[in-house]
Image (cartoon, helix red, strand yellow):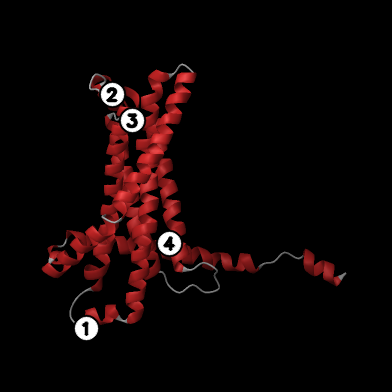
Amino acid sequence: MLRWLREATPDTSALDELPMTTVRWLTGWWRIIHFGAQLLVLTLSPSSYVRENRGAMTRHLYLDTAPMLPWFTVLSALISLVIIRIVMVTSVSYGLSQYALEMVVRVLVLELIPLAAAVFSAFRCTIPNAADLVAMRLRGDFDRLRESGTEPLGREVLPRVAAGVFATLMLVAVSCVLTLLLAYVSVYGFIGGGFANYTHTVGRVFEPVVALIFVLKAFFLSIAVAVLPIASVLYDGPRVRTRITAEVQGLLRVFSVILLIEAASLVGNYY
């Protein structure tokens, strides 16, 4: 009887930890916002662009973008060709071939490519950069930079964040242009006779509001994947009695913000 009563009594430990969990969640997001504000101030400050910092930023812009740009471009081109072919065959079978090109542009260029570029950049660029920064801090590199009169946030952190933003935007731009070219070739072939109809269709899709939403979406996705992983590992306090490390917490934050940005863009484009 006593055993049955103990099993039937609800476990209140989760309810007891709820206030502390909420406080930790709010504190983590506040640190991320504060970190983003610090980076914004550094970005606008001329002192952040001394020769050493410019060299570090240029190096990270190149090393974080050039190695993955060809691979992502080839991968996105192959996937785009498959999706374009599926859309073309399906639209022809249903007698809706006049809408095939518009559907390809909306599905691939507006929706899939920015999301894929953000996820690819997060896994290949910003999350490894966050791990490097944690290793540097544990080795004491940040303390040595401060002792020499150099701010680590401007020398090591800002170049990596800027590289994450640049890499994501570059992946989006190159892949979208390539997909538009592949869509034209798939629909009209290697002739210039369909250029007028093609530009009219693409222009109808990218009306001013949709174009603005697309640019804002790409920009905020790049900010999210560049800032959140690094902020989560550098500025999250020690987590007590939790199964989630700072790296996993940063990854969860990235995906949650990506979903919010995608939902907001869908609402803006179609409602």
Which of the 4 image quarters holds residue 38? bottom left
Disc nearer the start of the sequence (1/4): 1
Query: At label 1, which amino acid type do we have?
Result: Glu
Disc nearer the start of the sequence (4/3): 3
Say which residue appears at 22% left-offset and 22% top-offset: 192
**Residue for badge 2:** 198
77 horizontally vs 208: left or right: right
Q: Position of residue 205 (x, y in %)?
A: 32, 28
Cα–Cα gap, marks 4 and 3: 36 Å
Element assignment for label 2: helix
**Residue for badge 3:** 183
**Disc 1 vs disc 2: which is toward the camera?**
2
Which of the 4 image quarters holds residue 179? top left
- Residue lying farthest to the front in this orientation: 190
Disc nearer the start of the sequence (1/2): 1
Label 4: few (<14), some or many (≥20) within 10 Å?
many
Cα–Cα gap, marks 4 and 2: 41 Å
Q: Nearer the viewer, residue 59 or 74?
A: 74
Say which residue appears at 67% left-offset and 67% top-offset: 12
Mark on residue 250? 4
Label 3: few (<14), some or many (≥20) within 10 Å?
many
Cα–Cα gap, marks 1 and 2: 60 Å
Say which residue appears at 45% left-offset and 74% top-offset: 238
**Disc 4 vs disc 3: which is toward the camera?**
3
